[in-house]
Amino acid sequence: MRILGVSTLAVKLFLAAWLLLSAAVGALAWVLGVLDIPLAAMVAGVLALLGAVITLAASQSSALRRSDEADASLKAQISQTQSQLRALGGVIEDLAGEVKALQSAFIAAPIQSDAGPIALEGEHPLALADASQGEGVQRPPRAQQIASAILSNRIDLHVQSLHHLPSRRPLFFECLSRLRNEEGEVLYPAGFLDIAARSRLITTLDNFLLLRCVQIIRQFGKRAALETFFVNVSHTSLHDPEFFEQFVDFLASNAALADHMVVEIAVPGLAELLPDIRAGLRRLKNAGYAFSLDHARLEDIGADAAALGARYIKVPAQAFLSDAAAQPVLASAKTHGLTCIATHIEDEKTLIDVIELGIEHAQGYVFGRPRPWDDVLVSKGLAQVA
Protein backbone atom coordinates (compact mmCIF):
# COMPACT_ATOMS: atom_id res chain seq x y z
CA MET A 1 0.00 0.00 0.00
CA ARG A 2 1.22 3.50 -0.83
CA ILE A 3 0.13 6.86 0.63
CA LEU A 4 0.74 9.92 -1.57
CA GLY A 5 3.34 8.00 -3.50
CA VAL A 6 5.26 6.84 -0.36
CA SER A 7 4.87 3.40 1.20
CA THR A 8 3.05 3.24 4.57
CA LEU A 9 5.92 1.31 6.17
CA ALA A 10 8.47 3.97 5.17
CA VAL A 11 6.29 6.73 6.64
CA LYS A 12 5.85 4.86 9.93
CA LEU A 13 9.56 4.13 10.27
CA PHE A 14 10.54 7.73 9.55
CA LEU A 15 8.01 9.18 12.02
CA ALA A 16 8.99 6.69 14.72
CA ALA A 17 12.68 7.56 14.31
CA TRP A 18 11.93 11.28 14.31
CA LEU A 19 9.80 11.03 17.47
CA LEU A 20 12.59 9.15 19.25
CA LEU A 21 15.10 11.76 18.13
CA SER A 22 12.84 14.62 19.28
CA ALA A 23 12.31 13.00 22.68
CA ALA A 24 16.06 12.38 23.02
CA VAL A 25 16.85 16.03 22.23
CA GLY A 26 14.31 17.25 24.84
CA ALA A 27 15.61 14.84 27.47
CA LEU A 28 19.22 15.82 26.79
CA ALA A 29 18.40 19.54 27.12
CA TRP A 30 16.72 18.89 30.50
CA VAL A 31 19.57 16.68 31.77
CA LEU A 32 22.16 19.33 30.86
CA GLY A 33 20.08 21.92 32.61
CA VAL A 34 19.64 24.00 29.49
CA LEU A 35 15.86 23.81 29.70
CA ASP A 36 13.36 22.94 32.39
CA ILE A 37 10.93 20.06 31.91
CA PRO A 38 8.03 22.08 30.30
CA LEU A 39 10.31 23.81 27.81
CA ALA A 40 12.15 20.56 27.02
CA ALA A 41 8.79 18.86 26.36
CA MET A 42 7.74 21.78 24.17
CA VAL A 43 10.96 21.56 22.13
CA ALA A 44 10.45 17.80 21.66
CA GLY A 45 6.85 18.46 20.51
CA VAL A 46 7.93 21.14 18.04
CA LEU A 47 10.57 18.84 16.61
CA ALA A 48 8.02 16.01 16.29
CA LEU A 49 5.59 18.37 14.52
CA LEU A 50 8.37 19.54 12.23
CA GLY A 51 9.10 15.92 11.32
CA ALA A 52 5.45 15.32 10.47
CA VAL A 53 5.41 18.43 8.27
CA ILE A 54 8.58 17.34 6.49
CA THR A 55 7.10 13.85 5.89
CA LEU A 56 3.87 15.30 4.48
CA ALA A 57 5.74 17.72 2.24
CA ALA A 58 7.97 14.95 0.89
CA SER A 59 4.95 12.75 0.25
CA GLN A 60 3.11 15.52 -1.57
CA SER A 61 6.19 16.28 -3.65
CA SER A 62 6.48 12.62 -4.63
CA ALA A 63 2.78 12.46 -5.48
CA LEU A 64 3.02 15.59 -7.64
CA ARG A 65 6.04 14.18 -9.42
CA ARG A 66 4.23 10.92 -10.11
CA SER A 67 1.17 12.84 -11.27
CA ASP A 68 3.30 14.86 -13.68
CA GLU A 69 4.85 11.66 -15.03
CA ALA A 70 1.39 10.08 -15.45
CA ASP A 71 0.13 13.21 -17.25
CA ALA A 72 3.12 13.16 -19.58
CA SER A 73 2.58 9.45 -20.31
CA LEU A 74 -1.14 10.01 -20.91
CA LYS A 75 -0.43 12.92 -23.25
CA ALA A 76 2.03 10.75 -25.19
CA GLN A 77 -0.56 7.97 -25.48
CA ILE A 78 -3.23 10.43 -26.60
CA SER A 79 -0.84 11.88 -29.19
CA GLN A 80 0.02 8.41 -30.48
CA THR A 81 -3.66 7.44 -30.65
CA GLN A 82 -4.48 10.63 -32.52
CA SER A 83 -1.71 9.89 -35.02
CA GLN A 84 -3.04 6.35 -35.53
CA LEU A 85 -6.58 7.64 -35.99
CA ARG A 86 -5.37 10.23 -38.51
CA ALA A 87 -3.54 7.50 -40.42
CA LEU A 88 -6.60 5.23 -40.32
CA GLY A 89 -8.79 8.09 -41.41
CA GLY A 90 -6.51 8.67 -44.38
CA VAL A 91 -6.76 5.02 -45.40
CA ILE A 92 -10.55 5.08 -45.08
CA GLU A 93 -10.77 8.29 -47.10
CA ASP A 94 -8.57 6.80 -49.82
CA LEU A 95 -10.70 3.66 -49.99
CA ALA A 96 -13.92 5.67 -49.96
CA GLY A 97 -12.54 7.86 -52.74
CA GLU A 98 -11.64 4.83 -54.85
CA VAL A 99 -15.05 3.23 -54.40
CA LYS A 100 -16.89 6.51 -55.06
CA ALA A 101 -14.82 7.01 -58.20
CA LEU A 102 -15.62 3.50 -59.33
CA GLN A 103 -19.27 4.05 -58.50
CA SER A 104 -19.37 7.26 -60.55
CA ALA A 105 -17.61 5.55 -63.44
CA PHE A 106 -20.03 2.62 -63.36
CA ILE A 107 -23.08 4.88 -63.28
CA ALA A 108 -21.76 7.06 -66.11
CA ALA A 109 -20.73 4.12 -68.29
CA PRO A 110 -22.13 0.78 -67.12
CA ILE A 111 -19.93 -2.15 -68.04
CA GLN A 112 -21.27 -4.30 -70.82
CA SER A 113 -20.29 -7.93 -70.75
CA ASP A 114 -20.96 -10.45 -73.51
CA ALA A 115 -19.32 -13.22 -71.54
CA GLY A 116 -22.19 -13.56 -69.05
CA PRO A 117 -21.86 -13.70 -65.31
CA ILE A 118 -18.72 -15.12 -63.78
CA ALA A 119 -19.30 -17.98 -61.32
CA LEU A 120 -17.71 -17.61 -57.93
CA GLU A 121 -14.89 -20.04 -57.29
CA GLY A 122 -16.57 -22.89 -55.47
CA GLU A 123 -20.05 -21.47 -56.24
CA HIS A 124 -22.81 -23.66 -57.59
CA PRO A 125 -24.50 -22.89 -60.94
CA LEU A 126 -27.89 -22.76 -59.20
CA ALA A 127 -26.81 -19.42 -57.78
CA LEU A 128 -27.68 -18.03 -61.20
CA ALA A 129 -31.30 -18.72 -60.47
CA ASP A 130 -31.02 -16.95 -57.11
CA ALA A 131 -29.37 -13.95 -58.74
CA SER A 132 -32.09 -13.61 -61.38
CA GLN A 133 -34.97 -13.42 -58.91
CA GLY A 134 -36.82 -10.13 -59.09
CA GLU A 135 -35.39 -9.11 -62.46
CA GLY A 136 -38.67 -7.36 -63.31
CA VAL A 137 -38.43 -5.00 -60.33
CA GLN A 138 -37.12 -1.52 -61.08
CA ARG A 139 -33.80 -1.16 -59.22
CA PRO A 140 -30.68 1.00 -59.35
CA PRO A 141 -28.03 -0.17 -61.84
CA ARG A 142 -26.25 -3.32 -60.65
CA ALA A 143 -22.87 -1.57 -60.58
CA GLN A 144 -24.29 1.18 -58.39
CA GLN A 145 -25.70 -1.40 -55.95
CA ILE A 146 -22.33 -3.18 -55.76
CA ALA A 147 -20.28 -0.04 -55.15
CA SER A 148 -22.82 1.19 -52.59
CA ALA A 149 -22.82 -2.14 -50.75
CA ILE A 150 -19.03 -2.21 -50.45
CA LEU A 151 -18.79 1.49 -49.53
CA SER A 152 -21.42 0.96 -46.81
CA ASN A 153 -19.78 -2.27 -45.58
CA ARG A 154 -22.83 -4.37 -46.40
CA ILE A 155 -20.66 -7.46 -46.87
CA ASP A 156 -21.55 -10.75 -45.19
CA LEU A 157 -19.62 -13.97 -44.73
CA HIS A 158 -21.35 -17.13 -45.90
CA VAL A 159 -19.84 -20.59 -45.74
CA GLN A 160 -20.39 -23.85 -47.60
CA SER A 161 -19.40 -27.10 -45.96
CA LEU A 162 -17.16 -29.77 -47.48
CA HIS A 163 -17.82 -33.33 -46.32
CA HIS A 164 -16.06 -36.61 -45.71
CA LEU A 165 -17.50 -39.66 -47.47
CA PRO A 166 -19.26 -41.95 -46.94
CA SER A 167 -20.06 -40.61 -43.46
CA ARG A 168 -21.09 -37.18 -44.81
CA ARG A 169 -19.37 -35.65 -41.80
CA PRO A 170 -18.56 -31.95 -42.40
CA LEU A 171 -14.80 -31.35 -42.37
CA PHE A 172 -14.13 -27.96 -43.90
CA PHE A 173 -15.80 -24.65 -44.65
CA GLU A 174 -15.34 -22.66 -47.84
CA CYS A 175 -15.67 -18.92 -47.24
CA LEU A 176 -17.87 -16.94 -49.63
CA SER A 177 -18.75 -13.24 -49.72
CA ARG A 178 -22.27 -11.91 -50.12
CA LEU A 179 -23.36 -8.32 -50.65
CA ARG A 180 -26.63 -6.71 -49.56
CA ASN A 181 -28.39 -3.83 -51.30
CA GLU A 182 -30.02 -0.96 -49.43
CA GLU A 183 -33.20 -3.00 -48.97
CA GLY A 184 -31.22 -5.79 -47.30
CA GLU A 185 -31.62 -8.21 -50.21
CA VAL A 186 -28.67 -10.48 -50.96
CA LEU A 187 -26.68 -9.83 -54.15
CA TYR A 188 -25.43 -13.20 -55.35
CA PRO A 189 -22.00 -13.64 -56.99
CA ALA A 190 -23.46 -14.34 -60.42
CA GLY A 191 -24.79 -10.81 -60.34
CA PHE A 192 -21.76 -8.89 -59.14
CA LEU A 193 -18.51 -10.77 -59.88
CA ASP A 194 -18.50 -9.82 -63.55
CA ILE A 195 -18.35 -6.16 -62.49
CA ALA A 196 -16.14 -6.57 -59.43
CA ALA A 197 -13.62 -8.64 -61.41
CA ARG A 198 -13.00 -5.66 -63.69
CA SER A 199 -12.08 -3.34 -60.84
CA ARG A 200 -10.27 -3.30 -57.50
CA LEU A 201 -13.57 -4.09 -55.80
CA ILE A 202 -12.83 -7.81 -56.06
CA THR A 203 -9.61 -7.24 -54.08
CA THR A 204 -11.68 -5.53 -51.39
CA LEU A 205 -13.85 -8.64 -51.18
CA ASP A 206 -10.76 -10.86 -50.97
CA ASN A 207 -9.49 -8.70 -48.13
CA PHE A 208 -12.81 -9.03 -46.35
CA LEU A 209 -12.81 -12.83 -46.61
CA LEU A 210 -9.24 -13.07 -45.33
CA LEU A 211 -9.68 -10.72 -42.37
CA ARG A 212 -13.06 -12.19 -41.39
CA CYS A 213 -11.60 -15.69 -41.47
CA VAL A 214 -8.63 -14.60 -39.33
CA GLN A 215 -11.04 -13.01 -36.86
CA ILE A 216 -13.05 -16.24 -36.59
CA ILE A 217 -9.97 -18.40 -36.08
CA ARG A 218 -8.59 -16.11 -33.36
CA GLN A 219 -11.98 -15.77 -31.67
CA PHE A 220 -13.05 -19.40 -31.63
CA GLY A 221 -9.94 -21.45 -32.31
CA LYS A 222 -9.27 -22.10 -28.61
CA ARG A 223 -12.92 -22.56 -27.67
CA ALA A 224 -14.00 -25.18 -30.21
CA ALA A 225 -12.62 -27.70 -32.65
CA LEU A 226 -12.98 -25.53 -35.72
CA GLU A 227 -12.93 -27.00 -39.18
CA THR A 228 -10.41 -25.74 -41.71
CA PHE A 229 -11.44 -22.69 -43.74
CA PHE A 230 -10.85 -22.50 -47.49
CA VAL A 231 -10.26 -18.85 -48.47
CA ASN A 232 -10.50 -17.98 -52.16
CA VAL A 233 -8.06 -15.49 -53.67
CA SER A 234 -9.10 -14.17 -57.07
CA HIS A 235 -6.75 -13.92 -60.01
CA THR A 236 -7.40 -10.16 -60.03
CA SER A 237 -5.91 -9.90 -56.54
CA LEU A 238 -3.03 -12.20 -57.43
CA HIS A 239 -2.28 -9.90 -60.38
CA ASP A 240 -2.01 -6.95 -57.97
CA PRO A 241 1.63 -6.89 -56.75
CA GLU A 242 0.86 -4.62 -53.79
CA PHE A 243 -2.00 -6.78 -52.52
CA PHE A 244 -0.20 -10.06 -53.08
CA GLU A 245 2.95 -8.90 -51.29
CA GLN A 246 0.98 -7.71 -48.26
CA PHE A 247 -1.14 -10.88 -48.35
CA VAL A 248 1.94 -13.12 -48.27
CA ASP A 249 3.69 -11.01 -45.61
CA PHE A 250 0.65 -11.11 -43.34
CA LEU A 251 0.07 -14.86 -43.56
CA ALA A 252 3.78 -15.71 -43.34
CA SER A 253 4.12 -13.64 -40.15
CA ASN A 254 1.04 -15.34 -38.65
CA ALA A 255 1.98 -18.95 -39.33
CA ALA A 256 -0.28 -20.23 -36.54
CA LEU A 257 -3.23 -19.53 -38.84
CA ALA A 258 -2.02 -22.29 -41.17
CA ASP A 259 -3.58 -24.92 -38.88
CA HIS A 260 -7.05 -23.67 -39.81
CA MET A 261 -6.67 -21.97 -43.20
CA VAL A 262 -6.23 -23.19 -46.78
CA VAL A 263 -5.55 -20.73 -49.61
CA GLU A 264 -7.69 -21.60 -52.63
CA ILE A 265 -6.82 -20.58 -56.19
CA ALA A 266 -8.65 -21.36 -59.43
CA VAL A 267 -6.69 -23.46 -61.91
CA PRO A 268 -7.82 -21.77 -65.17
CA GLY A 269 -5.29 -19.04 -65.93
CA LEU A 270 -2.98 -20.05 -63.07
CA ALA A 271 -0.13 -21.06 -65.40
CA GLU A 272 0.17 -17.45 -66.66
CA LEU A 273 0.28 -16.17 -63.09
CA LEU A 274 2.87 -18.57 -61.70
CA PRO A 275 6.02 -16.74 -62.86
CA ASP A 276 4.94 -13.71 -60.78
CA ILE A 277 3.53 -15.45 -57.71
CA ARG A 278 5.55 -18.65 -57.39
CA ALA A 279 8.03 -17.14 -54.91
CA GLY A 280 5.19 -15.86 -52.72
CA LEU A 281 3.43 -19.22 -52.81
CA ARG A 282 6.70 -20.88 -51.81
CA ARG A 283 6.94 -18.58 -48.77
CA LEU A 284 3.42 -19.55 -47.71
CA LYS A 285 4.19 -23.23 -48.22
CA ASN A 286 7.32 -22.93 -46.07
CA ALA A 287 5.22 -21.19 -43.40
CA GLY A 288 2.97 -24.26 -43.26
CA TYR A 289 0.05 -23.17 -45.46
CA ALA A 290 -1.67 -25.61 -47.79
CA PHE A 291 -3.31 -24.74 -51.10
CA SER A 292 -6.47 -25.88 -52.76
CA LEU A 293 -6.78 -25.84 -56.55
CA ASP A 294 -10.34 -25.13 -57.69
CA HIS A 295 -12.01 -25.80 -61.05
CA ALA A 296 -9.34 -28.39 -61.86
CA ARG A 297 -9.41 -31.13 -64.50
CA LEU A 298 -8.31 -34.71 -64.14
CA GLU A 299 -5.10 -33.91 -65.99
CA ASP A 300 -4.27 -31.26 -63.39
CA ILE A 301 -3.94 -33.94 -60.71
CA GLY A 302 -0.32 -34.98 -60.37
CA ALA A 303 3.24 -34.05 -59.45
CA ASP A 304 3.03 -30.41 -60.63
CA ALA A 305 0.13 -29.66 -58.28
CA ALA A 306 1.92 -31.32 -55.38
CA ALA A 307 5.14 -29.41 -56.09
CA LEU A 308 3.19 -26.16 -55.99
CA GLY A 309 2.13 -26.95 -52.44
CA ALA A 310 -1.42 -28.07 -53.19
CA ARG A 311 -2.93 -30.44 -50.67
CA TYR A 312 -6.48 -30.37 -52.02
CA ILE A 313 -7.72 -30.36 -55.60
CA LYS A 314 -11.34 -29.78 -56.58
CA VAL A 315 -12.78 -31.41 -59.68
CA PRO A 316 -16.46 -31.43 -60.74
CA ALA A 317 -18.07 -34.76 -59.91
CA GLN A 318 -19.15 -35.39 -63.49
CA ALA A 319 -15.53 -35.15 -64.66
CA PHE A 320 -14.70 -38.10 -62.39
CA LEU A 321 -17.79 -40.08 -63.35
CA SER A 322 -17.52 -39.60 -67.11
CA ASP A 323 -13.82 -40.42 -67.54
CA ALA A 324 -12.52 -44.00 -67.57
CA ALA A 325 -9.16 -42.71 -66.34
CA ALA A 326 -10.65 -41.57 -63.02
CA GLN A 327 -9.44 -44.59 -61.01
CA PRO A 328 -5.76 -44.33 -62.08
CA VAL A 329 -5.89 -40.57 -61.49
CA LEU A 330 -7.25 -41.06 -57.96
CA ALA A 331 -4.48 -43.54 -57.25
CA SER A 332 -1.92 -41.04 -58.57
CA ALA A 333 -3.40 -38.33 -56.33
CA LYS A 334 -2.79 -40.44 -53.22
CA THR A 335 0.76 -41.10 -54.35
CA HIS A 336 1.43 -37.36 -54.51
CA GLY A 337 -0.35 -36.57 -51.23
CA LEU A 338 -3.30 -34.84 -52.91
CA THR A 339 -6.84 -35.01 -51.53
CA CYS A 340 -9.42 -34.98 -54.32
CA ILE A 341 -12.71 -33.20 -53.65
CA ALA A 342 -15.66 -33.89 -55.95
CA THR A 343 -17.68 -30.69 -56.37
CA HIS A 344 -21.08 -29.71 -57.78
CA ILE A 345 -22.87 -32.74 -56.35
CA GLU A 346 -26.56 -31.91 -56.76
CA ASP A 347 -28.39 -35.15 -56.03
CA GLU A 348 -28.19 -38.41 -54.13
CA LYS A 349 -27.50 -40.53 -57.23
CA THR A 350 -24.39 -38.52 -58.09
CA LEU A 351 -23.29 -38.74 -54.46
CA ILE A 352 -23.65 -42.53 -54.43
CA ASP A 353 -21.71 -42.82 -57.69
CA VAL A 354 -18.91 -40.69 -56.25
CA ILE A 355 -18.75 -42.83 -53.12
CA GLU A 356 -18.61 -46.02 -55.18
CA LEU A 357 -15.72 -44.53 -57.14
CA GLY A 358 -13.78 -44.26 -53.89
CA ILE A 359 -13.69 -40.47 -53.56
CA GLU A 360 -13.60 -39.50 -49.88
CA HIS A 361 -14.36 -35.76 -49.98
CA ALA A 362 -17.23 -33.89 -51.59
CA GLN A 363 -19.00 -30.54 -51.86
CA GLY A 364 -22.32 -29.54 -53.34
CA TYR A 365 -25.92 -28.50 -52.87
CA VAL A 366 -26.88 -32.06 -51.90
CA PHE A 367 -25.35 -31.21 -48.50
CA GLY A 368 -27.02 -27.80 -48.33
CA ARG A 369 -26.60 -24.33 -49.74
CA PRO A 370 -24.10 -21.78 -48.43
CA ARG A 371 -25.37 -20.19 -45.23
CA PRO A 372 -24.45 -17.19 -43.09
CA TRP A 373 -21.66 -17.79 -40.61
CA ASP A 374 -23.93 -16.57 -37.80
CA ASP A 375 -26.21 -19.54 -38.48
CA VAL A 376 -23.22 -21.87 -38.11
CA LEU A 377 -22.39 -20.29 -34.75
CA VAL A 378 -25.92 -21.01 -33.56
CA SER A 379 -25.73 -24.63 -34.69
CA LYS A 380 -22.39 -25.02 -32.87
CA GLY A 381 -23.69 -23.40 -29.69
CA LEU A 382 -21.14 -20.60 -30.00
CA ALA A 383 -23.49 -17.69 -30.69
CA GLN A 384 -23.12 -16.40 -27.11
CA VAL A 385 -19.32 -16.22 -27.57
CA ALA A 386 -19.50 -14.01 -30.66
Image: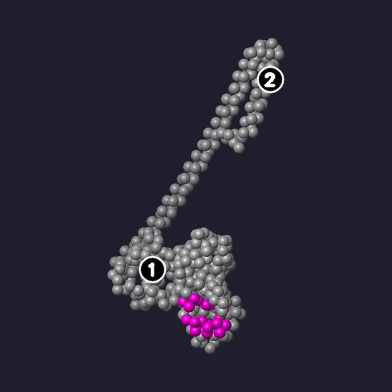
Mark seen at residue 102? none
Above/below status of 343 relative to 324: above
Q: What distance separates the C-alpha of mark 1 from that of mark 2?
A: 89 Å
Q: Which residues are magenta?
A: 347-367
**Which residue is found at the position 52% from the left and 37% from the top?**
67
Q: In which quadrant of the rendered view does residue 240 lie?
A: bottom left
Give me the residue at 40% from left, 71% from top.
189
Q: Is residue 107 visible?
A: yes
Residue at label 1? 186
Which quadrant of the figure contains the N terminus?
Answer: top right
Q: Which mark is residue 24?
A: 2
Majority SS type along the magenta span = helix
Q: Dot 1: few (<14), some (14–19), or many (≥20) neighbours within 10 Å?
A: some
Give the secondary structure at mark 1.
strand
Expressed as whole percent of the image width and height from the top left, the position of residue 376 reads: 49, 67
Residue 92 position within the rendered picture, expressed as x and y whole percent measured from the top left: 40, 57
Farthest residue, direction bottom: 324
**Mark before the other along the chain sequence, 1 or 2:** 2
Mark 1–mark 2 contact, CB under 8 Å?
A: no
Tell me the quarter of the picture where residue 54 sits: top right
Say if residue 238 shows up in the picture. Answer: no
Q: Residue at x 60, y 19 (%)?
A: 46
- In the image, is 286 to the left or to the right of 126? right
